[in-house]
């Protein structure tokens, strides 16, 4: 047999029916559901009087609307209705749901892996673009729309078009102060937000092998920000060790059998990718986005770009519009950008390792006087508990951060946590689009360490100056 | 699903690249549990001068006179002409729902983001990919000629100008078939229910841990 890429193996293992040359009906193993993109799908099923195909494949939670302050009842009636609609649908169909108040509740892309509900060799879908996160476990994981959520609920399958394959190789040791987030932003900065459109990306190379599962999830999470619907990483010891003993992971003889199979979930030697891109880890710096697209990113010691130096008129207008929206001037040093708020959280950077790395910078320090709000929002109730067991909550609170309950929070501001017009935020989230964190808000994407450093300084600063 | 066969419609030019789905329909409107009513909030932050709220009456809100869909000559537009990577970001299907509810039935751009592109087909909205040079020509033509219309024929896979110039576009055969006929994809798939069950039997033998009792 010809050598296969990991993507080709995953694809082939899930084909129920070949529809046309490049379109197939794919079987879906795990369906993650949250409150925002599911109500219309459940309603569609009821109208057509269709049952669910395999209830046991579904894991649901509320995350986008959930308050991060202690509230038994959500204050906003529209949010409250959306959350209770999910609760009602899950109760009606017998779906396993981690509701508000359950210690296992949290961001859907944090709890799936945390529970071992995401396993190697699975197809994983969710009505959320950041489903690419789960590819860190050598799963084929894709974000889908609500019509497709309904399709998967009713049929356990998805009509899919086979993607082209891209291998993104990162080699070498990451410099101190440089994290998986910086690797992701660096790749997006080079490829552009459409560079991965139509591709499934496999991240490979020595840098990736050295990353923890948390780091790998951060990287795969942002594959969608490079335009790729799926990002993935081969199985190795790190994957297996992470999963062992998780509640949904197989046990005993099944575990042994599963591990044997999972070890085959790597690209074969000699497998051919449609495209290969290589990065040198040593050249990656702590990065800061300056604009309104994740590709608008530079090193913390660089300057805001000058649109006059851009030859392409569409790109030049894009830069000018971004600078105007962000209220920045061309050529100003990134370190001169003064911030108002700091957000540590989101499906990109709210796991225990993220909180540890931010706390390491904040220990014995305090947020600057100009910071009006600094939030830490753990990715799940279990992440929160683990952090508290290590005393991280005390470090954050002593530094002037608010220690909140889990949810998507200020990444997109569907709950009360958002930016006001004109406010500027150092954020560990994934999107800096206009209005993403609140209408008129200005978002700079950074790693958790860089967010912590910016909180302390009141402006962006190279975290490496604080680590020594 | 709504059909799409042919459309002759007024073209509105949105001259920016990387229009994200947060811009198409901002987050506060995603709290709705309905599939309809998003049209008044399409491009809300760009279209109005105040901050939009769910379930509000938009008829009295201050509009941004510079935004393309507020310009008199583009009223009633059914085709949106735009630039690279339209629909990037969030997977929210509320984006095509809002476009469709507003009256946009087709989009023309040099490229679209994958999930958005896919979502359009489920809602009777046709995303047409044309080469960047052709899109640039169309932008110039729209600017030069008030009332500029195009005809899009999905069966023939062509975009035809009023002076008869035809540009062909590619579209996946299966998606085209479903959209031309307005087919219910779930119904189509359920005709293969036996195949799905047979697959599950094989898969449960190979990876039994996936089919055990869930937690």
Image (spheres, coloured by chain):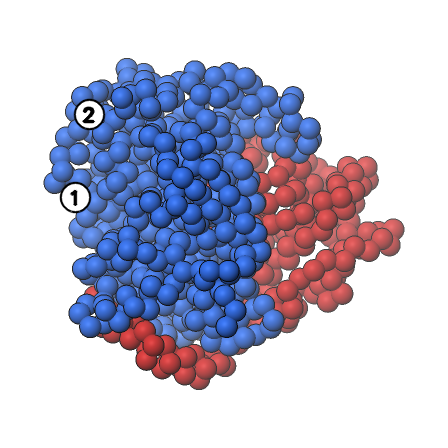
Chain colours: A blue, B red
Residue A229 location, x and y as percent? 49, 53
Residue A383 location, x and y as percent? 21, 45
The Cα–Cα distance between marks 2 and 1, rounded to whole angstroms, is 18 Å
Which residue is pictured at 63% across the width and 32% down the height?
A315
Picture quadrant where residue A29 is located: bottom left
Which SS class for mark 2?
loop
Which residue is pictured at 60% across the width and 31% down the height?
A318
- Is residue B180 visible from the viewing direction of this image? yes
Is A45 situated left or right of B74 in this image?
A: left
> Which corner quadrant holds the N terminus of chain B?
bottom right
Which residue is pictured at 61% across the width and 66% down the height?
B175
Q: Please determine whether, in this image, residue A224 is positioned above or below residue B17.
A: below
Judge the density around disc 1: few (<14), some (14-19), many (≥20) Cα neighbours within 10 Å.
Answer: some
Picture quadrant where residue A233 is located: bottom left
Residue under label 2: A363
Picture quadrant where residue A98 is located: bottom left
Identity of the residue furthest to the right in this view: B163
Which SS class for mark 1?
helix
**What label sits on residue A386 in the rendered view?**
1
């Amino acid at each position: 047999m010809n050598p296969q890429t990991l993507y080709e193996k995953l694809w082939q293992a899930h084909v129920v029916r070949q529809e046309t040359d490049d379109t197939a009906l794919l079987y879906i193993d795990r369906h993650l559901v949250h409150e925002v993109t599911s109500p219309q799908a459940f309603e569609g099923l009821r109208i057509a009087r269709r049952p669910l195909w395999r209830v046991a494949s579904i894991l649901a939670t509320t995350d986008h609307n959930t308050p991060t302050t202690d509230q038994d009842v959500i204050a906003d009636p529209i949010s409250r209705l959306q959350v209770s609609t999910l609760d009602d649908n899950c109760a009606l169909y017998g779906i396993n749901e981690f509701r508000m108040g359950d210690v296992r509740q949290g961001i859907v892309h944090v709890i799936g892996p945390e529970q071992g509900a995401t396993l190697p060799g699975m197809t994983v879908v969710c009505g959320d673009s950041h489903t690419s996160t789960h590819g860190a476990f050598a799963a084929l994981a894709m974000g889908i729309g609500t019509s497709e959520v309904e399709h998967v609920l009713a049929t356990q399958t998805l009509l899919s078009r086979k993607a082209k394959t891209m291998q993104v190789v990162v080699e070498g040791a990451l410099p101190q102060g440089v994290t998986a987030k910086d690797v992701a932003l660096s790749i997006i900065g080079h490829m552009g937000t459409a560079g991965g459109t139509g591709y499934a990306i496999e991240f490979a190379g020595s840098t990736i092998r050295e990353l923890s599962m948390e780091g790998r999830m951060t990287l795969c999470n942002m594959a969608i920000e490079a335009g790729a619907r799926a990002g993935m990483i081969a199985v190795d010891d790190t994957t297996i060790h992470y999963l062992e003993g998780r509640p949904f992971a197989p046990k005993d003889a099944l575990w042994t059998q599963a591990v044997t199979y999972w070890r085959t979930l790597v690209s074969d030697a000699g497998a051919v990718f449609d495209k290969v891109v290589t990065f040198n880890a040593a050249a990656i710096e702590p990065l800061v986005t300056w604009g309104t697209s994740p590709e608008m990113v530079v090193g913390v010691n660089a300057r805001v770009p000058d649109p006059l130096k851009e030859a392409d008129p569409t790109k030049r207008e894009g830069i000018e519009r971004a600078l105007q929206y962000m209220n920045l001037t061309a050529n100003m040093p990134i370190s001169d950008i003064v911030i108002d708020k700091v957000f540590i959280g989101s499906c990109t950077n709210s796991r225990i390792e993220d909180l540890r790395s931010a706390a390491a910078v904040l220990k014995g320090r305090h947020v600057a006087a100009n910071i009006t709000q600094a939030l830490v929002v753990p990715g799940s109730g279990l992440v929160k508990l683990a952090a508290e067991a290590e005393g991280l909550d005390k470090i954050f609170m002593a530094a002037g951060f608010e220690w909140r309950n889990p949810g998507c929070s200020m990444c997109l501001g569907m709950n009360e946590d958002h930016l006001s017009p004109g406010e500027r935020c150092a954020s560990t989230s994934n999107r800096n689009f206009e209005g993403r964190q609140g209408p008129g808000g200005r978002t700079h994407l950074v790693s958790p360490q860089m967010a912590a450093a910016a909180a302390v300084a009141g402006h962006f600063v190279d975290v490496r100056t604080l680590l020594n | 699903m709504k059909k799409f066969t042919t459309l002759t419609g007024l073209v509105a030019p949105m001259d920016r690249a990387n229009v994200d789905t947060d811009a198409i329909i901002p987050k506060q409107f995603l709290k709705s549990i309905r599939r309809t009513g998003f049209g008044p909030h399409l491009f809300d932050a760009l279209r109005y001068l105040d901050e939009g709220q769910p379930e509000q009456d938009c008829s009295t809100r201050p509009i941004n006179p510079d935004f393309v869909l507020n310009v008199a000559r583009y009223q009633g537009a059914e085709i949106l002409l735009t630039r690279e990577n339209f629909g990037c970001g969030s997977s929210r299907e509320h984006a095509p729902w809002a476009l469709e509810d507003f009256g946009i039935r087709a989009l023309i751009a040099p490229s679209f983001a994958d999930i958005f592109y896919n979502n359009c087909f489920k809602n009777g909205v046709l995303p047409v990919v044309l080469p960047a040079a052709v899109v640039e020509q169309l932008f110039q033509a729209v600017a030069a000629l008030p009332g500029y219309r195009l005809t899009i024929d999905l069966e023939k896979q062509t975009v035809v100008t009023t002076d008869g110039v035809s540009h062909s576009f590619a579209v996946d055969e299966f998606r085209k078939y479903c959209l031309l006929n307005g087919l219910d994809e779930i119904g189509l798939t359920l005709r293969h229910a036996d195949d799905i069950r047979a697959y599950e039997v094989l898969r449960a033998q190979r990876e039994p841990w996936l089919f055990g009792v869930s937690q």
